[in-house]
Amino acid sequence: MMIGFHPGGPAHPASAQPRRTHRPRAFLLGLALSATLTVSNSIHAADLGSALKELKAVAAEGKGNPTASAAWKRVAAADGRSLPILLAAMDGANDYSLNWIRSAIEAVVQRETSQGRALPVDALLRFARDTKHHPRARHLAFELVSQQDKALAQKQLPGFLNDPSPDLRREAVAALIAQGVETVAKNKEAAIPIFQKALASVRDADQVEDLATRLKELGQKVDLPRVFGWVTQWRLIGPFDNTAGAGFEKAYPPETSIDPNAEYDGKAGKVKWSDYTTKSDYGLVDFNTPYGAIKEVTGYAVAEFWSDTARRVEIRLGCKDGWKVWANGKFLFGRDEYHRGVEIDQYRMPVDLQKGRNVILVKCCQNEQKEDWTKEWEFQLRVTDLSGNPIFSSR
Amino acid sequence: MNPSFFQLPKSLRRSLTPLVLSAVASLSLQADWTQFRGAGGDSLQPSGRVPSVLSTNSLVWSLPLPGRGISSPIVVGDRVFLTSSSGGRQERLHVLCYNLSDGSLRWERKFWATGRTMTHEKISSAAPSPASDGRAIYALFSSNDCVALDLDGNLIWYRGLGRDYPNASNSLGMASSLAVVDGVVVAQVENDSESFTAGLDAKSGLNVWKLDRPKKANWTSPFAFREADGRTSVILQSSKGVVAVDPKTGKTRWNYADGASTLPSTTPAGGRLYVPSQGLTVLEPAADGTLKQVWRSAQLRPGTASPVVLGERVFTLNDGGILTCGDTKDGRRLWQLRLKGAFSATPVSAGGFLYCVNEDGLVQVVDPNAPSGAVVSELPLKDIIVGTPSIAGDSLFVRSDKRLWRIGRNSAL
């Protein structure tokens, strides 16, 4: 059986699209291909399944590249009717594979459109709406719908306002912001609820800041710490020594145990833990506040984060100093770059929270630079779900 | 092709065909602009014939871009290749192929960045320039995603170097461009943390070699250099200095350790290297691997733009727009010319003229043979331009975050 293009033929049923990427999924993929596709001169269904499997086998350091290169051409030879199947192959794919599959899809779309053939809009739209699929595949499906029928795509945007796909949500928020901007020119009061609705759904920092500015201009207060979901309650200890950057690798006592009553030898005498609450709109935990604008030093911040359930989340950090982060004693990541820049969600670290009390430890290192733009010794941190929705400590 | 070729015996034609094709490809590459600062890595297009008098009539075409970027366009045959990036976090990476003749889009491939995309606001993920060996396009992005596509847009390989080596990034952005040397794609991924340069197999993208490099942010670009003994080295510049490595193995052939800039890149000319080090330092590597320092001049210190050598003169351009001309024999400063505006882009040259594009998008054509240099024409593109232009055939290619221009002899007029 082969994959074929059928002008005017029925779209692929969404139910035929595979959902997961385990061995049974490969079987389902083959079944879907066999059940829904008929004759074509492009590529055998079995071969397509095999080629997609090879694209999904690529891994770090180019592993699988030589095989994938040949497989890519076989996938790119598929026709437009098979687009939902190619998109579904992204389910469970790693980030390398996503790019292999995406570019093959683009080659298919390029060929179909250059030959004047319409894309299967209905099937693509169903795919975009189906939250069981990979968020990036869904957004790509939406883009293809938009390419074929922009007005139809635009009509769908309100439905994506609280979507788990960050890209679809972003587009929906952008549409609402545009609507608010259009409204504000005619009726400022009427624009306020539009912007507020967008603010309730927004996740990307640039859109948050845009909305906050617009609402402020309309006399509205925005609780930015709440919108972003910063962790605001901390205990700090420091300064420890970081002369010539050596403190970054040196494990000071807080890295082995957190004892709130302990006292240690610091860089300039005894140091002990003290409470710290940030009131910054951007959740900045500023070590310069308790310790002064000093250089070549290291500080630690610890926070309790309570969760009602065991769940996978992301710890998202912004920091322009050297830093390391641990969760429940497990080292997550660290970076010894100083004063190159900071932004919200600069670093994203997946972590499994346990039910109940969790402990987040941040090490923040200041270096020897003396320029004005190197004074900052601070970080910002929040906990989100995997889509970027802020999660608050339950206590 | 010469008809006499077909009059040869079939067996001879078979054996000669690869040679002929190779010669044609070689000639073609000479006229192409295959990487940042051109095929020679020296900002020169020897066969280029860009008009020196530019006006709005010189705009052959211009087109809007789907994303931002400061990477240089490259030109291979009848195609112009460009990278750009889009999305809220510049996480969408574009590789674009346009027809040289009319600027129409031939194909586009998009990828999702697998590494960090944060950059200084002035730049974006599409900061490093792509490179080509005439058979494929190799594109690197600030996220350290590296992709190889054939000239028709078929994916050959993909590497997420920022994912493979997760502390390899720069929060100001990465901008070192690629070089392709002897079947090896050289990606200089040098930064304050996990700093390395990798030689990737052009056919598979797999690591051929990977060198630990100085832990210091670095935006300079590698290029091929013909040594005195005829071998080709890859030149790698960093804050520590300059090293020449074997493109096949990554092994060091010689090392200059007197420090160097991390912004403007070294320029090769006449078997010498014009190194942005202690001002400008000229090195002459000998066949035995020893280095001779020919001269050094603090007066010829470059800004962000890399030096350009035209015959017996070397030109440096500082960020404030002062173009300085020096004598290649001894580094003596000959003259200075104030250009309009601030500069990040390296000047490029064809037909003996220098084409300098400032950050306000003003193209200034400099006649370097005038007694103290002279601007002979200007063309305002009215956009912020940071990326270095390119030259192929009779045209200059300039890009901004928003547009790509082909400037040259407008046959439509």
Image (cartoon, helix red, strand yellow):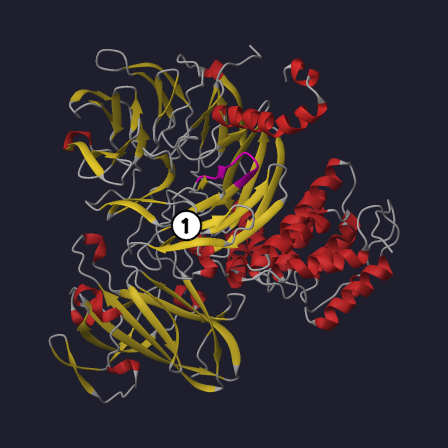
Is B131 contained in the magenta span? yes
Q: Residue at image x 32%, y 54%?
A: B213
The 10 Å Cα crowd at callout 1, few under 14, some 14 to 19, many 20 or more, is: few
Is B33 contained in the magenta span? no
**In the visual, does B12 lie left or right of B64?**
right
Which residue is label 1 attached to?
B249
Along the line of sight, which residue is nearer the eye, A148 or A243? A243
Q: Residue at image x 18%, y 74%?
A: A239
Instruction: Using the rendered view, name the quadrant where residue B242 is placed.
Output: top left
Along the line of sight, which residue is nearer the eye, B290 or A177? B290
**In the visual, does A366 lie left or right of B350?**
left
State which region is magenta. B129-137
Q: How many discs mark residues in the rendered view?
A: 1
Classify A321 as above or below A264: above
**In the visual, does A232 lie left or right of B141?**
left
Q: Quadrant of the N terminus of chain B?
A: top right
Q: Quadrant of the C terminus of chain B?
A: top right
Image coordinates for residue A295, horizontal then vertical, percent: 16, 64
Give the SS element for disc 1. loop
Instruction: Using the rendered view, name the quadrant where residue A377 is placed.
Output: bottom left
Instruction: Using the rendered view, name the quadrant where residue A95 is placed.
Output: bottom right
The amino acid pointed to by label 1 is Thr
